[in-house]
Amino acid sequence: MKRDQGTGLLVIGAGGHAKVVVDAARRSKHFERFAILDENSAIWGTRVLEAEVIGGYEHLGRLDPNEWQAVIAVGDNEARRQLAEQIAKAGWQFARIVHPSAQIGTGVGIGEGTVILARVVINASARIGRHVILNSAAIIEHDCTVGDFAHLAPGSCITGRVEVGSLALIGARATILPGCHIGRSAVVGAGAVVTRDVPPGAVMVGVPARLLHASGRRTVATRCGGLLRDVKNKPYRIAVTGVGGGVGQAILRALRLASSDLRILGLDMNSRSAGLYLADVGDVLPPCSAPNYVERLLEIMTRESISVLIPGSDPELPVLTRARAEIESAGIRILVGASDPVDICRDKLLSSRFFRERGFPFVRTVPMADAVRLGDEVGYPLVVKPIDGSASRGVAILFSRAELEPYLAQSRYIAQEGAFPPSWSRRTGGLTAESIYREGALLQEEEISIQVVYDHVGEHLGTFTSVNQLQSGVPMFVDPLRIPQVESVVEQMADALRDRGLVGPINFQCRLTEEGPRVFEINPRFTGITGVRAAMGFNAPEAVLCRMLLDTPVDDVRASLVQPTDWLCIRYADEAIIDRARLEEMGA
């Protein structure tokens, strides 16, 4: 049986918002006494209107919840959510504060802890969640839904049948047109007019509202209900290897977008690698082929109290997967799975055999001893590349047996049938050197990249697809698109490896040919555009960390990973200017 509600109002927070909350509560005449709690000891004993700031949150255990109700006067949505969770666990009930000038229609539902300020209008059949702030003169039209911990700023208006997701912020005098859905933790800027659905975490501004940022300052962690901090409320420490290369640096960028609370250790074998100085702490490793590589890695990570290791370079993957048990026995979790799927991906002959035996569209791949026969059977051009290469290093396109001849003695090379889009043939009336090379450089267009992301136990979190244009193996133009016929096949291929022990990210490269999608490269790691994806709202490293460290529900993490299709990326080179003394300290 629910207990009687107390007549005292305990206000949590003593900032500017507390003043209007106390004023509205006093005018409602539902409360006989008021008190405020705030962690700032400098204001203890002062008053906000007629309410005294009696101390910090420890007073929650000293006051009688039967005599008081609580209300949280904190404008930040995520902070309000965390406080509500703590206070509810302490056994407190939450008050609903309604200013007497507010107009509330028939059939309106209002959740506990919600604050409704002066001249708010809520029309018939609207539903308002828990701990919502409806600020002065906000209008909520008929049949609208406002999720828990949302905030509608002064003068904002949501018209009929609008859905506002939990933790969303609708800015002052913003207008949401009928039927629109505002995603969880989204932000609509002041004065904006929203004419279409807004994805979770997006920041929208202008008239009509346009996407300013796909994820804004609200990260996967905060959208899923918690900062990336440990049980002692200290930042988690994450190590990233290979920060001298594009992949490791892309992971660094994604983690910086994820949370300023993370402490990042950058590792590389070259003391002049920029990533060592972009991380919070940097250190130099021996090459992964060195006998003391794992020993040195563990020594550094133990010294820095690392929680999770994220690999950022290809050559380290086979070494790290075989050292996984040793690393985890030191209390450090590592985002790499079993050795079998890593070996399959790293060896293109194994990749081709594994997937073609299962009926998947991986291009025919043979050792150089069989390359002449492959050319006779499928025709030229053929692609030759290192058996375990990446980033287009060592790739050549060969148009005849004569061009193939010099490569036949290369035991570490393989030959593949080409995967070329039909448009390349149409440009020149057939596949020729002119259609594949431009000014002596290999043409790398219409390449489809699909990042499939699993968590540390193999749960699928999300898939991000883009069509990229590359220069020397580096994506310079990234166009996010949904291509269902490709994604469906690739996710099945990823699942086949997941069933063999794959965890974390895996990236597939393919093209759409006249025969359909043809995969030609697979890498069981994050990629050089991981930071681009994160900036667009698909922060895969953070999503995995939320699962590993916070045990965030899978469905919440999936919902927080956004792939916009109305944005694209044009990349450019960047620099890191560092103190000479730091370089010398690193041993350069």
Image (cartoon, rainbow, N blue to C red):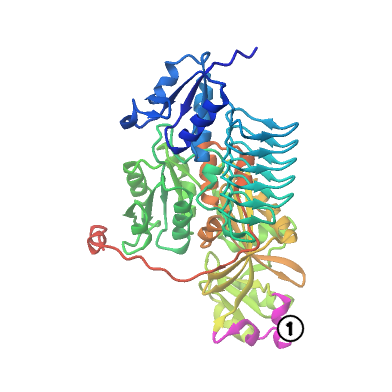
State left or right for residue 574 relative to residue 117: left
Displayed quadrant of residue 118: top right
Residue type beneath disc 1:
Arg
Where 66 falls versus 73 (above or below)? above
Depth order, front residue of 276/380: 276
Depth order, front residue of 256/53: 53
State left or right for residue 563 relative to residue 296: right
Is residue 315 at least partly visible in the picture? no
What residue do we see at 47% from left, 53% from top? 257
Is residue 320 at least partly visible in the picture? yes
Q: Secondary structure at mark 1?
A: helix
Locate residue 18, reporting x and y percent.
46, 33
Write the start and end of the magenta stretch as one range.
421-440
Residue 437: in magenta span? yes
Where 252 falls versus 9 (above or below)? below
Displayed quadrant of residue 287: bottom left
Q: Which residue is mark 1?
A: 426
State left or right for residue 322 relative to residue 173: left
What residue do we see at 24% from left, 64% from top? 580
